[in-house]
Image (cartoon, helix red, strand yellow):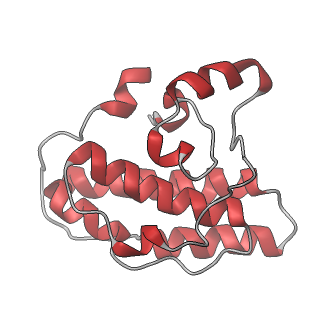
Amino acid sequence: MIRLAELAPPAPRSSAGVLHTAVGAARDAAELVDAGEPATAGWRFGVLQALDDYTSTCLRGGTELGAQVFTEPPAPTGSVELDAAFAALADYLAERDGWAAPLWIHDAWRTVKPGQWWASTPNIYRQIALEEGPRTFRDRGIWITLSGLARA
């Protein structure tokens, strides 16, 4: 399961186009933040939703189409952790799947540093996150395990 997070999506099956983007996922996450929900809710229903959207888009049209999920920069969510996580995810997928990362991932405000955030990583798995957390997340002060990026 851990290695699933490192595997590129399979070859495309159809070309229905991009149906959902990181912009929409970030908007959903921002609504949760505005409603007083913790950043972890935005992680689950925003960041991981963007990952699911990317994966399904790649299945329909390949990684070139999938990359378009991250073309437009997500607006600030009201949570520095989530803003950094959207940039880290786009950077991670671009690096993993071999497409050019969008320029917005380099926005200086899309980082948690000098702080740190454990996203959805329980205390018991924090050592694993320190050892295997993807560089693109670590560089922004976010600690996750590879299994935290594995989706069904």
In the rendered view, tell whether residue 116 sits above or below residue 1: below
Looking at this view, is 137 or 45 the one in front? 137
| Residue 5 position by quadrant | top left
Residue lying furthest right: 36
Q: Residue at x 30, y 63 (%)?
A: 101
Q: List x then y, in percent, for residue 17.
A: 21, 70
Q: Position of residue 8 (x, y in %)?
A: 24, 39
Q: Residue at x 70, y 66 (%)?
A: 80
> Residue 117's spot in the image, x, y percent?
72, 46
From the viewer's perspective, tell me whether residue 29 is left or right of residue 53: right
Front residue of 69 and 109: 109
**Residue 78 visible at all:** yes
Depth check, front residue: 15 or 78: 78
Q: Quick check: 119 left or right of 129?
A: right
* Direction from residue 103 to residue 30 in the image, left or right: right
In the rendered image, the vertical position of residue 3 relative to residue 60, given as above or below = above
Q: Where is residue 132 in the image (x, y as percent from the top left)?
A: 50, 25
Name the image quarter holding the C terminus. top left
Up the image or down, 134 lies above or below 111; here it is above
Along the viewing direction, whichever of 109 and 53 lies nearer the viewer: 109
Q: Horizontal placement of 108 versus 53: left or right? A: right
Examine the rendering and report whether any part of residue 55 can be seen.
Answer: no
- At a point 29% along the width and 54% down the height, the residue shown is 94
Tally of marks: 0
Whether 124 is drawn above or below 86: the answer is above
Residue projecting furthest to the front: 114
- The residue shown at (57%, 70%) is 26
Residue 131 quadrant: top right
Q: Pick the quarter of the image with the N terminus.
A: top left
